[in-house]
Amino acid sequence: MKIITTAALMLVAGPALGSSYDLPRQDVTNLCKRAAIGEFKAFPPDVKSTPQESYVACVDGEQVAYDWLKDRWPPLSENWQADCRREAGNTLSGVYRVMRVCLEKKFAVRDENLRKDREREAAQPVMPKKEFRY
């Protein structure tokens, strides 16, 4: 009975807990507040702005990156997700922006590999349709 109850609980609670395929939730408000007060460098040194302007720019940038990621994240392989989570975890600034850049790089490499594969296939001579009969 205990196993059935646990399994039932997992079925009910599972979606609420999220899965490894869900886009991770980040504390953007706290991150952007810390960046705005200069706790770490989130903006190039030549960008001069008030803490309020920095905060708004940070939140806006994270929102754009999050919106770009949210539909692209779930179908990704666990390896790609783990790579980008790890890369974002190694930075103090712009978690969603870092994850977006990570995915953009991965998509670019994938697309380049597909292009090369198509070129290789196109370079192969076309053989006539002739089957061997046994």
Image: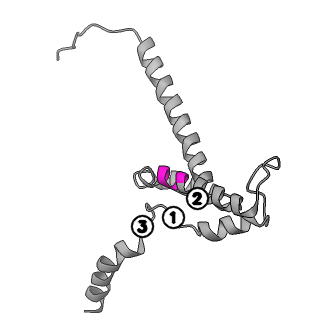
State the mark number for residue 42.
none
Find numbered disc 3 in the image and state the secondary structure of the residue it sits on: loop
Tag 3: amino acid: Ser
The residue under the point 58% across, 40% down is: 105
Q: Out of 53 and 13, give the one closest to the viewer.
A: 53
The reply to whether discs 1 and 2 touch (Cβ–Cβ < 8 Å) is yes
How far is the residue under mark 1 from the one under mark 3? Answer: 9 Å
The residue under the point 21% across, 13% down is: 131
> Along the horizontal axis of the image, is 111 left or right of 99?
left
**How busy is the neighbourhood of tag 1: few (under 14 within 10 Å), some, or many (20 plus)?**
some
The span picked out in magenta is 64-69
Q: Position of residue 61 (x, y in %)?
A: 60, 53
Tag 2: amino acid: Arg
State the mark number for residue 85.
2
Q: Earlier in the sequence, mark 1 or mark 2?
A: 1
Q: Out of 89 and 79, give the one closest to the viewer.
A: 89
**129 to 8, vertically: above or below:** above
Q: Out of 79 and 99, give the one closest to the viewer.
A: 99
> Along the horizontal axis of the image, is 73 left or right of 36?
left
